[in-house]
Image (cartoon, rainbow, N blue to C red):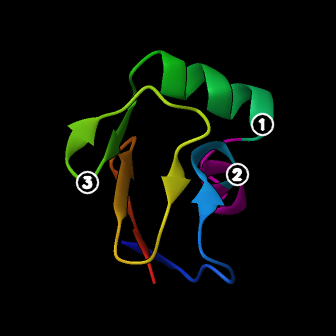
Amino acid sequence: MIEFKVTGDFIPMIQLLKAANLVQTGGEAQIVVTEGEVKYNGRTDYRKRLKVRKGDTVEFRNETIRVI
């Protein structure tokens, strides 16, 4: 599990995937989100600009990110 500390109120989903080094580029992050490869709090989510906040979890390619 990856624990990611968000410094503001939220981080956009595509930026989180990139910051956690799970994708190489923002473009790749957009693709994997729109193809349904990302789960947000246990459910598949297709929103690229989704605001991920403290307490949320994101699952992608056998990795779980817990936002703290």
Is the residue marked by circle 1 packed among few (<14), some (14-19), or many (20+) residues within 10 Å? some
The residue singled out by tag 2 in the image is 15
Distance (Cα) linking label 2 and label 3: 17 Å
Q: Amino acid at mark 1?
A: Gly
- Numbered label attached to residue 26: 1
Earlier in the chain: of badge 2 and badge 1, it is: 2
Earlier in the chain: of badge 3 and badge 1, it is: 1
Q: Amino acid at mark 2?
A: Gln
Residue 54 picture quarter: bottom left
* x and y, in percent, of residue 38 in the image: 40, 36
Residue at screen point 68% across, 84% down:
7
Quick one: 62 or 7, which is closer to the camera?
7
Q: Which residues are magenta?
A: 16-23
User: Is mark 2 in CB contact (under 8 Å) with mark 1?
Assistant: yes
Quick one: 50 or 33, which is closer to the camera?
50
Distance (Cα) linking label 3 and label 1: 21 Å
Q: Amino acid at mark 3?
A: Asn
| Vertical side of 26 occupied by 58: above or below | below
* In magenta stretch: residue 17: yes
The residue singled out by tag 3 in the image is 41
In the displayed orientation, state which residue is furthest to the front: 9
* In magenta stretch: residue 10: no
